[in-house]
Image (cartoon, rainbow, N blue to C red):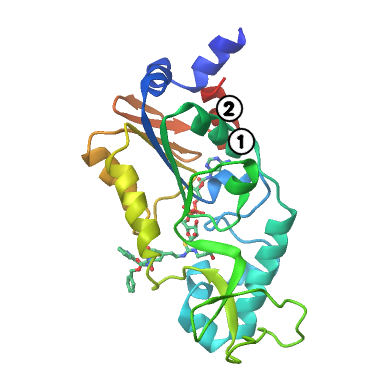
Amino acid sequence: MDMHNAFSQIVPPELVKTLRTAQRVTVLTGAGISAESGLPTFRDPMTGLWEKYRPEDLATPQAFRRNPRLVWEWYAWRRELVSQATPNAGHRALVTIEQHIPEFMLVTQNVDSLHQQAGSQRVIELHGNIRRTKCFDENVVVENREESEEVPPRCPRCGGMLRPDVVWFGESLPAQAFQTAVEAAVHADVFFAIGTSGTVEPAASLARVAQRFGATVVILNLDVKPLEAPPLYHINGRAGIVLPALVH
Ligand code: BV8
């Protein structure tokens, strides 16, 4: 089978045609796009020490107040994993798509900076970034002081505890970021939801918004039943395989 034919086995030709003429493309990504970079997703069992904890029980302000050391160390463990990860072919394919689409917006739930490292320019981080820290009391970004022997480290300004600059469950998303993401969903010709279980709101609502405003919606995941019913597509496959086939 020639490569073109092979790719058309992965991506419906009708969708490739739609993408070729699209002016506005919005992409929502979740932990699944970073899985092939070796980062654990949220709802696969976390390896090692954290198997007994659910992220929803750790990624909350209440958990941090209850046990700041445990939460800080969970994020330090994840920050270490993130620091060793590099972008994969799925991240890089999105950079190529961005270069060919007049109005492109990448909205991510991920906090790992892999899209930016791959070269994506227009990235909205809905849930913050694990590499940044902020003061728990003042809610302002403070540079990380990992070397401090105190766990969690203290804010140099007010002495409060430092925390990762991510959005925890029960916390509001950055208003400007979410507003921009909603506008990008409303105006999209094509909306991709890639590697996300669609369980976390309000990020998960973006695909429904795009659909309501007439976009072609593409759900790319490992656990979807393939569907080719334009303007809705469900593609079952790894982001690191399917996305490069799209830009082939
Ligand atoms: C809020 C922190 C207002 C950083 C995260 C309705 C409206 C508003 C709120 C809610 C609502 N209903 C419920 C809520 C509350 C809550 C919520 O959604 N709870 C869920 C659990 C039901 N939402 C909130 O609290 C949000 N806040 O709305 O503010 C407010 C204010 C006060 C009071 C009430 C409301 C805040 C949500 C943000 C939470 N923080 N992260 C961090 O530690 O990372 S969310 C966390 O989950 C991560 O950011 C993660 O990215 C995100 C979503 O998960 P996914 O990315 O989808 O990852 P998951 O593992 O689930 O799925 C991966 C998928 O990839 C799988 O489907 C798998 O099959 C697939 N996959 C795997 N490998 C591959 C692949 N696909 C392709 N290729 C592969 N190779």
Whichever of labels 2 and 1 marks the residue nearer the N terminus, that label is 1
Front residue of 23 and 206: 23
Is 16 above or below relative to 92? above
Splitting the image into 4 quarters, where does residue 177 fall? Answer: bottom left
Which residue is under mark 1? 92
User: In this image, 128 relative to 228: left or right?
Assistant: right
Q: Position of residue 95 (x, y in %)?
A: 56, 35
Q: Amino acid at mark 1?
A: Arg
User: In this image, 211 relative to 159: left or right?
Assistant: left
Q: Amino acid at mark 2?
A: Pro
Q: At x 59% / y 30%, what residue is drawn?
A: 241
Is 217 above or below relative to 74? above
Q: Is mark 2 within 8 Å of ligand 1?
A: no
Front residue of 39 and 46: 39
| Cα separation between marks 2 and 1 | 8 Å
Q: What kind of element bears circle 1?
A: helix
Front residue of 59 and 213: 213
Q: Position of residue 117 (x, y in %)?
A: 65, 47
Instruction: Count residues near mark 1 (Cα–Cα under 10 Å), then give few for <14, some for 14-19, many for 20+.
Output: many
User: In this image, 76 relative to 66: left or right?
Assistant: right
Marker count (numbered): 2
Instruction: Count residues near mark 2 (Cα–Cα under 10 Å), then give few for <14, some for 14-19, many for 20+.
Output: some
Q: Position of residue 153 (x, y in %)?
A: 67, 84
Q: Tell me the quadrant of the picture where the C terminus can be found.
A: top right
Ligand 1, by image quadrant, is bottom left
Q: Are marks 2 and 1 in contact (CB under 8 Å)?
A: yes
Residue 23 numbered mark, or none: none
Front residue of 41 and 26: 26
Which residue is under mark 2? 244
